[in-house]
């Protein structure tokens, strides 16, 4: 039996370069793993007859369309094995929030199975298996901070954030990812990002300057995120941005006290808020 933590990810930068012939979109994104023992899912995998899963969230499907089972099927297919497993998912991360919860769960299954089978696959091989499940899964396999290109599966190292506190709010409103891309395809951007400036400021480790260069093209598709960003700004966040296609919004803080003040302020304003 192997247990793995499935951590959230946030996008410090996310731009959409255009639609591909296969219907997907090319993106350029900077993703970072949010390490918090109180804000993560827990995945436990054990060898068993057949392939099945349980989940603490009764509203989440545990059928073949769940990414965890898709990950298990992809792993055993690559292994050329008919073996089975039981997956137990303890769910805490909000769903469809732009935090990569489902992808992180799938990646945790891949890592757990690989440990059960004595590390049969190298990390890059696990990433290739993960890419068949979803564009964010390869990043969730490796974690850290990465530049993601292509549809998100082409990863390269990127400077990490300096020591800081991150507050994540569930956000306001919701737009499905396909609908968000449709809006972007038909709407010129309100602002343009500058990836080079973000890289330079992250290399320098100045959190205040980093906060000035956060960028997410999808903010144009969910104007309601500005309500949460306003609270973050009023509470002294050094940078605030919507993650993924939304609707979660995060704020960066250089002190624990500042982050907790923002967390309580968001909760008092009726929003969810998690500290990492």
Image (cartoon, rainbow, N blue to C red):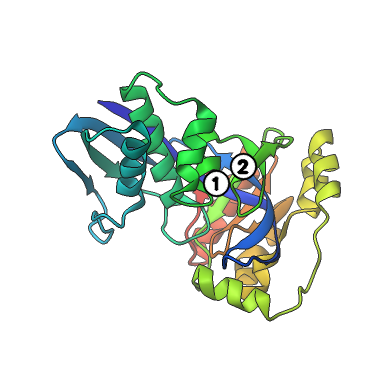
Q: Quadrant location of the N terminus? A: top left
- In this view, 37 is above or below 18: above
- In this view, 59 is above or below 119: below
Horizontally, residue 62 falls left or right of residue 228, namely left
In the rendered image, residue 220, in percent from the top left (x then y), is placed at: 68, 73
The 10 Å Cα crowd at callout 1, few under 14, some 14 to 19, many 20 or more, is: many
Q: Quadrant location of the C terminus? A: top right
In the image as oriented, which residue stretches furthest toward the bottom?
A: 186
In the rendered image, residue 195, in percent from the top left (x then y), is placed at: 80, 51
Q: Nearer the viewer, residue 114 or 128?
A: 128
In the rendered image, residue 247, in percent from the top left (x then y), is placed at: 53, 65
Question: In percent of the image, x 43 and y 50: which residue is there?
Answer: 133
Q: Are marks 2 and 1 in contact (CB under 8 Å)?
A: yes
Question: In percent of the image, x 76 and y 77: which residue is there?
Answer: 188
Horizontally, residue 258 falls left or right of residue 74, namely right
Q: Secondary structure at mark 1?
A: strand
Q: Which residue is mark 2?
A: 32
Q: Earlier in the sequence, mark 2 or mark 1?
A: 1
Q: Is residue 171 visible?
A: yes
The 10 Å Cα crowd at callout 2, few under 14, some 14 to 19, many 20 or more, is: many
Count all numbered tags in the image, as a single digit: 2
Q: Is residue 235 visible?
A: no
Q: Which residue is mark 1?
A: 9
Horizontally, residue 31 falls left or right of residue 202, namely left
- In this view, 232 is above or below 110: below
Res. 233 image quadrant: bottom right
Q: Nearer the viewer, residue 213 or 128?
A: 128
Res. 20 image quadrant: bottom right
């Amino acid at each position: 039996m192997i247990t793995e933590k499935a951590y959230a990810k946030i996008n410090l930068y996310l731009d959409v370069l255009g639609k591909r012939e296969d219907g997907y979109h090319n993106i350029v994104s900077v993703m970072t793993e949010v390490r918090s023992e109180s804000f993560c899912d827990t995945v436990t995998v054990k060898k068993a007859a057949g392939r099945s899963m349980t989940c603490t969230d009764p509203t989440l499907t545990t059928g073949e369309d769940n990414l965890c089972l898709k990950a298990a099927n992809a792993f055993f297919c690559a292994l050329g094995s008919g073996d089975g497993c039981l997956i137990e998912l303890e769910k805490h991360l909000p769903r469809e929030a732009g935090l990569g919860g489902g992808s992180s769960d799938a990646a945790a299954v891949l890592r757990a199975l690989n440990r059960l089978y004595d590390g049969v696959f190298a990390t890059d091989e696990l990433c290739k298996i993960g890419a068949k499940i979803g564009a964010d899964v390869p990043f969730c396999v490796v974690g850290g901070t990465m530049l993601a290109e292509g549809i998100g599966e082409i990863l390269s190292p990127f400077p990490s954030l300096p020591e800081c506190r991150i507050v994540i709010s569930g956000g306001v409103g919701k737009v499905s990812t396909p609908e968000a891309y449709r809006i972007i395809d038909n709407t010129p951007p309100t602002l343009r990002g500058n990836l080079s400036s973000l890289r330079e400021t992250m290399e320098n480790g100045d959190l205040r300057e980093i906060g000035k260069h956060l960028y997410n093209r999808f903010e144009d598709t969910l104007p309601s995120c500005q309500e949460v960003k306003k609270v973050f700004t009023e509470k002294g966040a050094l940078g605030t941005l919507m993650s993924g296609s939304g609707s979660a919004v995060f704020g960066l803080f250089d002190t624990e006290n500042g982050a907790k003040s923002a967390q309580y302020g968001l909760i008092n304003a009726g929003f969810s808020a998690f500290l990492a």
